[in-house]
Image (spheres, rainbow, N blue to C red):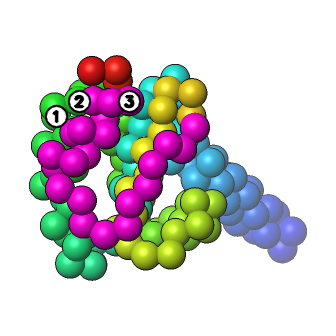
């Protein structure tokens, strides 16, 4: 009887520890170290958040290798929403290379405005 419990317990412990490691290591650090970072905190189900999707895709391509563009879904990552004191979605938070928050905006934000902020942070 004890051997059967042992056979079940070991895989369960392994699975639990693997899930915890994935949670700890799977999410990117916000802000990304030594990198200008823009994080869009929202949800895949809100209308303004959905409107941000193509903007974020374009920005990710345009600034690849120079700026970290991140999306956090508050329904999947409430801890990040709490960490950044999010009151409305979407909220965009901008960080300089030193990791200091330099600007935030709540609501839809157009690509041109975001590009202006990112270019300023990149020194352009």
Q: Are marks 3 and 1 in contact (CB under 8 Å)?
A: no
Instruction: Return the residue at label 2.
Output: 63
Q: What whole-number distance in Å separates the C-alpha atoms at marks 1 and 2?
A: 6 Å
Q: Are marks 1 and 2 in contact (CB under 8 Å)?
A: yes
Query: Split into 4 quadrants, where in the image is the N terminus?
Result: bottom right
**Between marks 3 and 2 in the image, the one whose residue lies nearer the viewer:** 3
Instruction: Return the residue at label 3.
Output: 121
**Between marks 3 and 1 in the image, the one whose residue lies nearer the viewer:** 3
Q: What whole-number distance in Å separates the C-alpha atoms at marks 3 and 1?
A: 17 Å
Q: Secondary structure at mark 3?
A: helix
Q: Secondary structure at mark 1?
A: helix
Position in image of residue 84 (x %, y %): 58, 60
Position in image of residue 95 (x %, y %): 48, 39
Q: Are marks 3 and 2 in contact (CB under 8 Å)?
A: no
- Point out the tag, 3 or 1, that comes first from the N-terminus: 1
Residue at 49 percent of width and 26 percent of height:
97
- Point out the tag, 3 or 2, that comes first from the N-terminus: 2
Query: Split into 4 quadrants, where in the image is the C terminus?
Result: top left
- Left/right placement of residue 85 relative to residue 118 reads right
- Left/right placement of residue 53 relative to residue 118 reads left
Q: What whole-number distance in Å separates the C-alpha atoms at marks 3 and 2?
A: 12 Å
Q: How many marks?
A: 3
Q: Point out the stretch of residues depicted in magenta.
A: 100-121
- Left/right placement of residue 76 relative to residue 113 reads right
Instruction: Return the residue at label 1.
Output: 61
Residue at 43 percent of width and 55 percent of height:
104
Residue at 56 percent of width and 34 percent of height:
99
Assess disc 1: are there few (<14), some (14-19) or many (≥20) residues with their C-alpha within 10 Å of its C-alpha. Answer: few
Residue at 73 percent of width and 58 percent of height:
13
């Amino acid at each position: 009887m004890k051997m059967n419990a042992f056979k079940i317990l070991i895989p369960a412990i392994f699975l639990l520890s693997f899930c915890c490691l994935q949670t700890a290591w799977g999410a990117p650090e916000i802000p990304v170290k030594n990198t200008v970072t823009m994080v869009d905190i929202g949800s895949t189900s809100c209308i303004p958040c959905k409107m941000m999707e193509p903007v974020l895709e374009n920005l990710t391509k345009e600034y690849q290798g120079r700026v970290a563009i991140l999306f956090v879904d508050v329904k999947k990552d409430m801890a990040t929403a709490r960490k950044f004191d999010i009151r409305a979605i979407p909220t965009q938070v901008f960080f300089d290379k030193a990791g200091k928050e330099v600007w935030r905006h709540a609501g839809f934000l157009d690509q041109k405005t975001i590009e202006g902020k990112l270019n300023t942070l990149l020194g352009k």
